[in-house]
Image (spheres, rainbow, N blue to C red):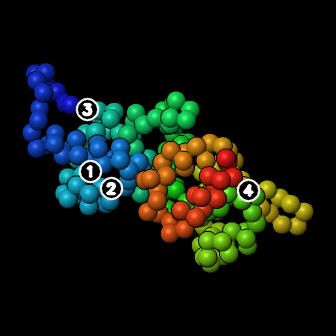
């Protein structure tokens, strides 16, 4: 990702060094948000914003909003299991999974399949309103759907295969999001084997 000045010569000044570090941090942690990137780089928020704008203008990174944070991804991020670049939908799912509660819900639905609200609430050990909030975000993003069953409604992943492929590929960058990740991950891995 080397930059060229207007004269065509390579530039390796401090500005470029910071952009290189930012790019590598984003590549190492897809879906990183602004404040987290500022902590990683050890520079001010305004400095990070400037460098991210330059990287976006250069089409090296893609920033998407998840409603609260702007999360960043390398534009050339590839999903190896399908030998394709990440789609906007993939990035939105990864951005949503950077929220520990949403990741816990997605993992439970990936492992268990369809679950009712009460079952999910018990599994993630959160209040009804917190669980409802995160389920509503996942439904609105199109990654989870509501399935009406007689007198109750359940929730399931819209495309379990695609979600599992993303979780497998980016599991290392998501491990810090949920304490029980390893246990759920083991269940998921053994159910696909």
Q: Which of marks 2 and 3 is in front?
A: 3
Cα distance, mark 1 to mark 2? Answer: 8 Å
Looking at the image, residue 141 sits to the left or right of residue 48; the answer is: right
In the displayed structure, 151 sits above or below 63; it is below
Mark 4 lies on a secondary structure that is loop
In the displayed structure, 114 sits above or below 24; it is below
Cα distance, mark 1 to mark 4? Answer: 40 Å
Residue denoted by label 4: 113
Residue located 29% across and 44% down the image: 24
Residue located 51% across and 30% down the image: 84
Q: Answer whether labels 1 and 2 touch (C-beta < 8 Å).
A: yes
Looking at the image, residue 48 sits to the left or right of residue 74; the answer is: left
Q: Which of marks 2 and 3 is nearer the N terminus?
A: 3
Where residue 1 is drawn, which disc sits there? Answer: 3
Q: Can residue 139 be seen in this view?
A: no
Mark 3 lies on a secondary structure that is loop
Q: How would you rate the neighbour count of disc 1 (Cα within 10 Å): few for under 14, some for 14-19, many for 20 or more? A: some
Q: Can residue 1 be seen in this view?
A: yes
Q: Nearer the viewer, mark 3 or mark 1?
A: 3
Q: How would you rate the neighbour count of disc 2 (Cα within 10 Å): few for under 14, some for 14-19, many for 20 or more? A: some
Where residue 49 is drawn, which disc sits there? Answer: 1
Residue denoted by label 2: 34
Q: Earlier in the sequence, mark 2 or mark 4?
A: 2
Q: Please state the horizontal and vertical placement of residue 41, each as a whole percent of the image.
A: 22, 55
Q: Which of marks 4 and 3 is in front?
A: 4
Q: Please state the horizontal and vertical placement of residue 6, each as a whole percent of the image.
A: 13, 24
Residue located 60% across and 62% down the image: 184
Q: Earlier in the sequence, mark 4 or mark 3?
A: 3
Q: Nearer the viewer, mark 1 or mark 4?
A: 4
Cα distance, mark 2 to mark 3? Answer: 20 Å
């Amino acid at each position: 990702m080397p930059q060229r000045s207007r004269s065509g010569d390579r530039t390796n000044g401090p500005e470029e060094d910071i952009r290189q570090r930012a790019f590598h941090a984003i590549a190492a942690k897809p879906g990183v948000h602004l404040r987290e990137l500022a902590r990683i780089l050890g520079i001010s928020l305004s400095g990070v914003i400037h460098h991210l704008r330059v990287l976006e203008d250069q089409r090296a990174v893609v920033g998407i909003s998840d409603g609260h944070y702007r999360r960043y991804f390398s534009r050339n991020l590839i999903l190896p299991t399908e030998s394709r670049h990440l789609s906007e939908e993939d990035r939105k799912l990864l951005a949503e999974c950077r929220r520990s509660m949403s990741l816990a819900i997605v993992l439970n639905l990936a492992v268990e399949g369809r679950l009712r609200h009460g079952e999910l609430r018990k599994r993630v050990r959160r209040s009804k309103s917190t669980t409802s909030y995160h389920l509503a975000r996942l439904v609105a993003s199109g990654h989870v759907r509501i399935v009406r069953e007689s007198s109750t409604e359940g929730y399931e992943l819209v495309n379990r295969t695609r979600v599992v492929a993303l979780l497998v590929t980016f599991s290392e960058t998501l491990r810090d999001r949920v304490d029980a990740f390893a246990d759920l991950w083991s269940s998921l891995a053994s159910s696909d084997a």
